[in-house]
Amino acid sequence: MADTASGMGNIMDQKGQGGRPEGAGKGSGGGRGEKAGKGGGERGRKREPLPESALAAAAAALAPDLDAGVAPRADRLIEYLHRLQDAHGALHADHLAALAEALKLARAEVFEVATFYHHFDFVPAGAEAPPALTVRVCDSLGCAMAGGAELAASLASRLGADVRVQRVPCVGRCDSAPVAVVGQQPVLNADADKVVAVVASGERDEALPDAIRFDAYRAAGGYALWDALRSGERDAESIIAALDGAGLRGLGGAGFPAARKWRTVAAQPAPRNMAINIDEGEPGTFKDRHYLATDPHRFIEGMLIAARVVGIAGIWIYIRDEYPALRRLLAEELDRVRAEWPDLPPIELRRGAGAYVCGEESAMIESIEGKRGMPRLRPPYVAEVGLFGRPTLEHNLETLWWVRDIVEKGGDWFASFGRNGRKGLRSFSVSGRVAKPGVVVTDAGITLRQLVDEHCGGMLPGHELYGYFPGGASGGILPASLADVPLDFDTLAPHGCFIGSAAIVVFSQHDQARVLAENAMEFFAHESCGQCTPCRVGTAKAAELMKAPEWNAGLLTELGKTMMDASICGLGQAAPNPMQSVLRFFPHEVAAKQQEKTA
């Protein structure tokens, strides 16, 4: 154990040399390391020495950084918590205390982060750890319609006390509902027998997907544009002009014009950072998983081009914890890219920990900085003051995935697609009661009816279209009578809906819109970060009120308006959408007086 103590001393010494990321500026880590270094929160009552086992656990969590020549840093706290959880099956109180000492942080800072994220299992002193194996069963929209709750109940009775069965929010595989995850092994189109068999087999890890790897991508012309930009054959302004001509907008949900964002961040003082959001937690969304599992280098090339054009000093990629195989794949391919071009800006791959709110750009930035994923008040905007206090270019994976094709083929090529007066291509994640769910890449402005008939094989046998979510759980609900409305940015606003990340969840006459709206509201209540009262209290209160056989339309409408007007971020602002859609388009289900005539 003497070596362990020595190792901890070395860790403390290296942290004291400055754990701030290069180019992070004054705001790096919120000054947490320096502040805690004055005593690490030890003033007051004298604490008992931590056991050697706890010191050893913390040292092991930090060891990979030291082995790579990287001084442990406070902004990497969530990475260290993952290592502790992976190694010990939970986060034990004394392990967290040892980690806090090693990082020179107050224990409260480590504990508040460890207890914020759903994928961390905090075990207080003297408490019993959860079973070694957890089976997670998705109960969000698509899986709920496919019997996810019933599957979870069946597994709980069949697997016994040695296996923990949890009902969890969307795991990003809505096209294969219902889904269970045994350890980190997804079971698609699951039933109880299939899941029990996987548990018995000992399979716990998802296999890597059959993606296009670096050599194959390069041989097919990949990175030619990147090489041309590096050599000066292509200039930055011509690339931005191509994106502008294509009308490319952010495809994570907000729809901000990509070219304008690049110009805005490029005009800010250096150093500038870049943050990429692959934390697609919106129920019904799985397009980023599709692109990363099939053609990851098209995204990576777009990322490198954006970094070069905008003048980025460092890149952080934030990927959801539910995609472990994709995280391994991306890590391998990034290593290959670094080997090919050693002069790239630093690229860090960060692992989410189960927090839907981190899909919001500033909450993701807080998480990357090693904090709770709580959205920031704006202004200032992240393009001005973002990651580690520096101007930050934030993008969704799919937006960058299109960069190469648009620049090589021209903005006019991308803009030539589209229907009903809209321009461009959209990637629709289609799930629910359709014959062929999956990712559909087709014209912006296509209607739901056209999408289902032309690309999804129609409705499932015995099912007729009753309604659909055009933008995941937060995008609202539309009835079958509005199945001919063009699907694109801005086209759905007159109906109280939006397209967001283009997650289309289709339901039939065998489903109830009110039940699905209740499911969505319970999801938002579960995922609220709790920072602002309108969202924290509003989602919980709405979920409670929506359980009534007859809805109090006046009270729910007033509550929804308060949430929309006063919530800090898009979670609370959009959470009332499904509820209000039911009041507007499906009032007969809740015996509520219809407030507006349907279009």
Image: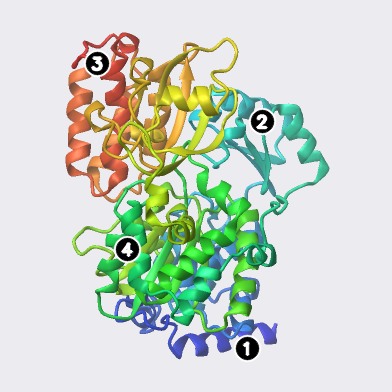
Q: Earlier in the sequence, mark 4 or mark 2?
A: 2
Residue 218, located in which quarter of the rendered image?
bottom right
Q: Earlier in the sequence, mark 4 or mark 3?
A: 4
Q: Amino acid at mark 3?
A: Thr
Q: Earlier in the sequence, mark 2 or mark 1?
A: 1
What residue sits 29% from the left and 45% below the top? 570
Q: Nearer the viewer, mark 4 or mark 3?
A: 4
Residue holding disc 4: 241
Q: Nearer the viewer, mark 4 or mark 2?
A: 4
Q: Position of residue 102 (x, y in %)?
A: 51, 79
Q: Are marks 3 and 2 in contact (CB under 8 Å)?
A: no
Q: CA distance from mark 1 to mark 3?
A: 71 Å
Quick check: 147 left or right of 517?
right
Q: Are marks 4 and 3 in contact (CB under 8 Å)?
A: no
Mark 2 residue crowding within 10 angstroms, few (<14) / some (14–19) / many (20+):
some
Residue holding disc 3: 598
Q: Amino acid at mark 4?
A: Ala
Residue holding disc 2: 189
Quick check: 218 left or right of 13?
right
Q: CA distance from mark 3 to mark 2?
A: 36 Å
Q: Would residue 266 be visible to someone looking at this image?
A: yes
